[in-house]
Every structure is written in structure tokens, then in C-alpha cells.
Amino acid sequence: MSQSPGKEQNIMPQPSAAVGRRLHRLAAVVIALAVLAAVGFWWSKGRQAGTSPAVVPKAAANASNEPAPAAPPKPAFEILTGRWQRPDGGYIIEVRSVEPGGRMNAAYFNPQPINVAKAEASQSDGTVSVFIELRDVNYPGSTYRLTYDSADDCLKGIYFQAALGQTFDVYFVRLQP
């Protein structure tokens, strides 16, 4: 390259046309791959949405992360919900709910709340039974074993007073809401 005397020229290398074309091709390939990936994803989702539920294997249908719908409570256990009072002392059992398996959400009052360690309902030969274990001050594992009497709409059974080691026949009547 020849320069005129006294004049300085800035000579910057110019990218060759070949390099420019390669960059354009690379960009076109990347865009084409992105479009193909998006179309493939869209197509696979469309196929899945179009699949009939009858064709989905049962194991695959149950493998979702959604919880199974709760089983309805046993009708026999529904009769237990409510507030029950022991007439000989004002003790109250409050049955808030009963799960289908028998686990009860229950509270006990004398007249202040006493910790309910365990509360379960069961059914055998048409008889609905209740078991409640109390664990608190002066209630070191005291228990109620009761059965529902549909004729009198009451809970009858045995109370074991653990602190004294004594057992008593007891019954609870339903309090009206």
C-alpha cells in the first residue's frame, strides 16, 4: 500500500465478505432450529391434548401429582359430629369432624380444654364406637370407650381415670346447636 508523503491514513481491516456470509448463515441456522423446536413442542402438546382419556393407561392416570379426591365420610360417622355433654359433671366432648378412616378431630372440656392425644371412631356390626385418650395435667392417659346409642341419641360407655386407676360407667347427651 502506498501512502502519500505527509498524509497519514488509518487502515482498518475490513471483514471479508465470506466472514459476513458465514455469520448470516449461522444466525439463520440458529433461528431455524429454534422455530423447529417450538413447532415440535407445540405439536407434541397438541397430540397429548387430543388423546382420549380412555386410551391413557390407568397407571399413568394415577401417576399425576394431584391428590386423589377425598373419600366421602362414612354416613355412620357423621352422626358423631357435634357437642356431647356428660350430665354428671358438665364434661364436654366436641366432635368437629370424622375422616372416612375413623380419625376424629375432637376436643374435650372440663370446663377448660384438656389435651386430646387420640380420637378415633370405628364401626363393627352396625355399632359405631368412639375411643378418646386424654393426656394433660391430671389426665395421664385417661380414656373414654363409648358406643353410639341411636335410640337415645347418646354416647354410652366406660371412662378410665388413669390418675386414680378407676373405671366409671358414663354417658354423654347431644347438646343442641
Image: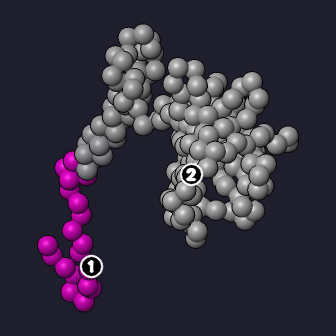
Please identify the quarter of the rendering in which residue 150 is found.
Answer: top right
Q: Where does the image place residue 27, in percent across and percent down from the top left?
A: 30, 46
User: Relative to 102, does residue 2 appear above or below in the rendering?
Assistant: below
User: Relative to 103, does residue 109 appear above or below in the rendering?
Assistant: below
Q: Amino acid at mark 1?
A: Asn
x 24%, y 72%: residue: 12
Question: Badge 2: how crowded within 10 Å, few (<14), some, or many (20+)?
Answer: some
> 156 and 123: which one is in front?
156
> 11 and 119: which one is in front?
119
Which residue is the extreme one toward the left?
Answer: 1
Q: Amino acid at mark 2?
A: Thr
Residue 155 in view: yes
Residue 135 in view: no
Instruction: Classify mark 1: helix, strand or loop.
Output: loop
x 58%, y 68%: residue: 138
Q: Which residue is mark 2?
A: 167
Which residue is the extreme one toward the right?
Answer: 176
Lateral position of residue 22 relative to residue 165, left or right: left
Q: Where does the image place residue 115, in percent across and percent down from the top left?
A: 59, 61
- Give me the disc on residue 64: none
Q: Which residue is mark 1?
A: 10
Give the residues drawn in magenta, as a range: 1-22
Residue 171 included in the magenta stretch of the image: no
Which residue is the extreme one toward the bottom?
Answer: 6
Residue 10 included in the magenta stretch of the image: yes
Please identify the quarter of the rendering in which residue 108 is found.
Answer: bottom right
The kind of secondary structure the magenta stretch mainly shows is loop
Say which of marks 1 and 2 sits in front.
2
Q: Where does the image place residue 153, in percent across and percent down from the top left?
A: 75, 31
Question: Badge 1: how crowded within 10 Å, few (<14), some, or many (20+)?
Answer: few
